[in-house]
Amino acid sequence: MSALNSIFSVFLPKEDKFFPMFRRLGEATVEAADLFTQLISETERTKQEELYLPIKAIETECDNIVINIFNELNDAFVAPFDREDIHELTGAIDDVVDLITSTSKRILLYKPKNIPTKALHMAEIILEGAKCERIGLNELQNMSKHPEVTLEQCQKLHDLEHEGDDVYESFLQELFESETDAIELIKMKDLMQGMESATDKANSVGKTLKTILIKYA
Amino acid sequence: MSALNSIFSVFLPKEDKFFPMFRRLGEATVEAADLFTQLISETERTKQEELYLPIKAIETECDNIVINIFNELNDAFVAPFDREDIHELTGAIDDVVDLITSTSKRILLYKPKNIPTKALHMAEIILEGAKCERIGLNELQNMSKHPEVTLEQCQKLHDLEHEGDDVYESFLQELFESETDAIELIKMKDLMQGMESATDKANSVGKTLKTILIKYA
Amino acid sequence: MSALNSIFSVFLPKEDKFFPMFRRLGEATVEAADLFTQLISETERTKQEELYLPIKAIETECDNIVINIFNELNDAFVAPFDREDIHELTGAIDDVVDLITSTSKRILLYKPKNIPTKALHMAEIILEGAKCERIGLNELQNMSKHPEVTLEQCQKLHDLEHEGDDVYESFLQELFESETDAIELIKMKDLMQGMESATDKANSVGKTLKTILIKYA
């Protein structure tokens, strides 16, 4: 937040501070997920590194937004929603971005010999989930007007987590059937686990949005 | 819940909706743990798969019960106990069932060459813990009448977690001393870790039951 | 707590029970971290085992303090701070001690062929963080008088987590570049991951201290 924004924001009601931050988190998650799908499809080392830099920058930006949200939350009574729900929502969004970033970094560190198709599929599930999160977070301010929009995203995030589970399980089965190099197996198991956790956390975002909707809409 | 039950439950006081759901969670945990001890002792692939199906069905049933409990919880003031305690209790029970299910699935996916005796021992600890959880959850409605019954289960769950730790540690020591096939080592380490987490979560159920007992009994 | 202390503490206001427990947790964390840096530098098996015993004893002591704090917390209105903040703070301190203890135990169980320099570096980061935690916990009772002291520790814990991340990442890169024995790789990856989590949790202690400071100072 710029200094000027900070000055203006003093005069804004509390809610008007929260919603733009959540909208930015939604947008940033899509940006990170989109860069991640590019990075995971990329085989050239230098291009992977170029794609990692903006992902890391987005993670840092999100960390700062999360700190701002938590600071605002400490004035609990002014928050538009229950403190604990906002805490849970923010934490889950942040976890998704963190998992995208750490998995990206590990691709650089591990230098896996090849990336299986199922990993690309998983990255696409993460990107699709990020788009659902973005819609849900954009709706946050007016969710009661069109509750069906939020509910649809929550359902999609739930379905994407299950799709992610299936991809992960069939990936694990293939990996243990065909990979004979234990070190390569460790690398890919670790990378896929990070991605599978990202789809879990995206569903946590959906579940918390649904809780908020039921309470306030 | 059947449609008929749903209709009747509208006329029931809130507490009478919660307790049967917790009793069912306790029963379901025992059923899943019992099937799991059979699955882990089984060497035939098709029989393992036959045992997995009802475990997965129990997990799905528990997920639905958990969603019902969380939905009811959103009317926070009517709940018989603190919202956060019920949230924690429900989450921990669900984690136990999830870990039993995911470990079962991984046995199918990993096809480990052999299952060591210590893994069977761990499964028995999980089953014994599930039985303690069942007693504790059955007592929930009347825990103040016989607090010693609940306290005994909490103590047993605590002791079982420590027993689980010891089995896990001596298993790890043996594994790293004797297993020379790195991929087999990864499989068994992962399976035992899932089981060890299940005993941790069972103790979390016990700890939350104790918190509730101290507050309300 | 000795029996005599228990008797006296009945007459003490609530706050005077909390603060000494937190001071002891801070001191105990430093003691455990200090023993851990010795253990990880030690190559003789019997000396490693000798160093593990007091670490385990400190962990048990901390577990008991945590149980005492949680029991006191159930009288929520008397607590000097928000119940949930104290819960989070206590949990994070306990996690640091647990991770130091479990990593120590795993060194004994895994018997890694050699401990890389980066692991010693990580142990020093944990010790430095423990000293920041100790100062922060000593200040808890009077944090509003010298808020800059607490804030300085929070900043240091934040920086130490980032330093820990960097060490962990460059360790992983080296490990996957140079370690050809998959089982040794699994051992060191697991040990370093435990230590990296300890620096994360130490930063969680710092973040919660900052939240408490902002709310009450």
Image (cartoon, coloured by chain):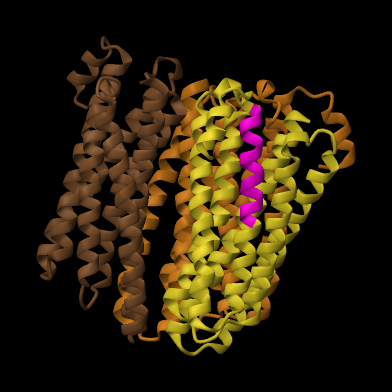
Chain colours: A brown, B yellow, C orange
State the image coordinates of residue B202 (x, y, percent, origin top left).
64, 54
Residue drawn at (73%, 43%), measured in percent from left and top? B138
In the rendered image, which quarter is residue C70 located in?
top right
Residue drawn at (27%, 20%), measured in percent from left and top? A17
Residue drawn at (28%, 71%), measured in percent from left and top? A110
State the image coordinates of residue B28 (x, y, percent, origin top left).
61, 53
What span is colored magenta in the figure?
A: B15-29
Looking at the image, which is closer to me, B147 or A197?
A: B147
Direction from residue B86 to residue A203 in the image, left or right = left
In the rendered image, which quarter is residue C102 located in?
bottom right
Secondary structure mostly seen in the magenta stretch: helix
Residue C24 can be seen in this image: no
Looking at the image, which is closer to me, B67 or B175?
A: B67
- Above or below residue A195? Residue C68 is above
Residue B24 included in the magenta stretch of the image = yes
Report the quarter where the N terminus of chain A lies: top left
| Residue projecting furthest to the front | B4
State the image coordinates of residue A108 (x, y, percent, origin top left).
23, 66
Residue A54 included in the magenta stretch of the image = no
Report the quarter where the C terminus of chain A lies: top left
